[in-house]
Structure formats: structure tokens, C-alpha cells
Amino acid sequence: MDNSDLDLIADLKNEKTRDFAFNSLVKKYQERLYWHIRKIVLNHDDADDILQNTFIKVWRSVDKFREESSLYTWLYRIATNESLTFINSNKRRSLIPMNDTSEFLMNNLESDVYFDGDEIQLRLQEAILKLPEKQRIVFNLKYFEEMKYEDMSKVLDTSVGALKASFHHATKKIEEYLKNRD
Amino acid sequence: MKLNLWQMKKSNDKITKLMNELEKIAPELSKIKKENPFRVPDNYFDDFSARLQMRLDAEKTGISKNQNKIIQFLKPALGLAAGFALIVMLAYWPLKTFTPNQLANNIGTETDISEMLYATMVEGIDVNSFYALLEEPNGSVQFSDDDLAIFVNTNSSEYEIYSETNN
């Protein structure tokens, strides 16, 4: 954990400095967490809600933060769980069958005014959406954010070996999809 | 500075390694430029902190509002409970105080009075009438030992009682 994060944690746990430290934390991590969430849920408004929920959860549970993991992985873990909770609750509310979430998310993507990608990027996103949820998250974290497997292991509570295998399978599936679409 | 450069080089090496792996297992994927196709509304990240703070403040207000709501809800209930307790005390205390013990005391008093009257009656009977009553066959009047003792004490002197008992 870098020194600035250590200082941030200390300030967060101190009532006198908590507000200021929390503000600093938000400024430091808002973009990274937002993009992580956005790649899971695709829609900007949903990502905005989830990002706020994430930071509110951080605010409420800062006292429970055990410094066994880094601040960075802890934040990502909360953001990931909030995103998955959102997707699952949407499934229940919309009565979407479990295997049709990719279609649901694809509709989200196509109707999203904040999607600026070209045809190739759209195809790549379609391919990624075909992956099972957790595999999709592994792929995004490795491919787009270049997160270390050791950090990913703490975020997703999965072994490094399983994550490497998951990424490998994900890239094979995406490759297959891109080849077949041509 | 040297350390940062070293870290950057290490990071670049890892990315290169990843890309090399991708070229081998996913050549089509490796051809696609790695970019972010999503965008956000203007000034989204500049405003986010302020919007989040508003939500946090609203939540804190909501918690204290909820606490107030609970107090407001409980007030009439507590008032009712206090009123009921007062009524119970106002009704209960007099009842406890004046009945049934009080009645029992009254009855006791009446009994005392009747017993006194009876004793007076026994005392007032003359000797001949007293014996007549004792000898009456199937007499309805029954005298207890106490009644006899009262009669004797009232109608005989101590000397006469002593003489009779020692003869």
C-alpha cells in the first residue's frame, strides 16, 4: 500500500479529519471506480448511482476496514459487489431469465447516448457481454485496467490461478466471436 | 526519479508481455485498438463530489428525521399510557383502601357490638331465669362456657365463687 493511502486511511479513521480525508479519497478514486462500474453495467446513469452507493458504503464502513488488503482493492471490491447487486436486482425486477442478461445489457449499450465507439468497438463490447458475469469482470480488469492478478484476487476473492485461467478462456471466447462476426 | 522510471519500465514490460500473449491466443482481439468507447456528460467528475456530499448530508438528515419521527410517534402513545396509569391509580387506590378490608373492619366492628350486647344480655339475666333456661328440655338457648363464666362473674362475688368451688 502506498504511503498516501496509508495516510488517507489514518485520516479517515480519525473523526476530526474524516470529512476532509473522504473528500480526498473521492477525488483520487472516483474516475477509476466509475470506469470499472461502467464497464459492468454499461449505462452512465446506472454507473453514476452505483458509484455514489459505493462511496456511501465506504463512508459507512470505514471503521470496519481491515488493513490486510490495500485501500485500492477494498474500494474495487465494494464497487464490484455493488455493480453485481444492481444487475441481480434488475434481473429480479424485470423478470429477465438468468441467461438473457447479455441481451438486456446489449440493449442498454445500444441505447446509451454516452457510447462513442465505432463499429469495431461495438463488436468488441458485444463479445465481452457474451461472457459470464465474473469472467467479464476479470477480462475488463485485466485487459482495460491492467490490474495485477494478485490485486484482482483480493477484489474478486478468487485464486490467482483461477483468474489466469478465466482470462485465458475469456480471450478465446472473444476471439471466436470476433472471427465469426467477420 | 530512478525508482519511478524503473517502475514504469516494469509496468511497460508487463503490458508488452500481455500483448504478446494476446497476439498468440487472440490475434483478432490484439488488432483492435485498446480504447475506451464510453464517455461521460461534461463536468461529470468535477461535480460528482458535490453531488455525493449532498446525498450524504441528506442521509444524515434522514437519520435524525427518522429519530424525530419515532419520538413524535411515541409521544401520543406515551401520553395514553401515562393517562391510563393515572386512571388506574385513581380507581385502584381507593378501591384497595376502602374495600374489602374496610368492609371486613366494619363487619368486625358490628360483630364486636353484637358480642357486647349479647354479653350484656347474659349478664342481665337473673339467677332463676338462668337456671330455668339451663334446665329447659331441648332448649333452643345454648350457653357456651364463656357465657357461663360471664354470668357467674357478673352475678357472684369472688368470695361466693371461692366458697362454691372449694366445697
Image: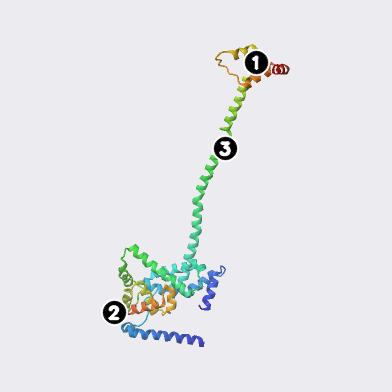
Disc 1 from disc 2: Cα separation: 132 Å
Q: What is the three-letter code of the residue carrying label 1? A: Gly
Quadrant of the image for the C terminus of chain A? Answer: bottom left
For marks 1 and 3, the one nearer the N-term is 3
Q: What is the three-letter code of the residue carrying label 2? A: Glu
Element type where label 2 sits in the image:
helix
Report how many numbered discs are placed on residues in the image.
3
Can you tell which mark lies on residue A176? 2
Within-10-Å neighbours for mark 1: few <14, some 14–19, many 20+: few
Give a yes or no on whether discs 3 and 2 share a subunit. Answer: no
Whether residue A165 can be seen here: yes
In this rendering, would A23 be left or right of A130?
Answer: right
Residue A95 location in percent, x, y? 32, 63
Element type where label 3 sits in the image:
helix
Nearest the viewer among A117 and A32 is A32
Disc 1 from disc 3: Cα separation: 46 Å
Chain that bears disc 2: A
Give the residue at the far front of this rendering. Answer: B167
Q: Are marks 1 and 3 in contact (CB under 8 Å)?
A: no
Residue A79 location in percent, x, y? 43, 71
Element type where label 1 sits in the image:
helix
Chain that bears disc 1: B
Q: Are marks 1 and 2 in contact (CB under 8 Å)?
A: no
Residue A52 location in percent, x, y? 44, 68
Disc 3 marks which residue? B93
* Residue B143 falls in image quadrant: top right
In this rendering, would A31 be left or right of A106?
Answer: right
Can you tell which mark lies on residue B124? 1
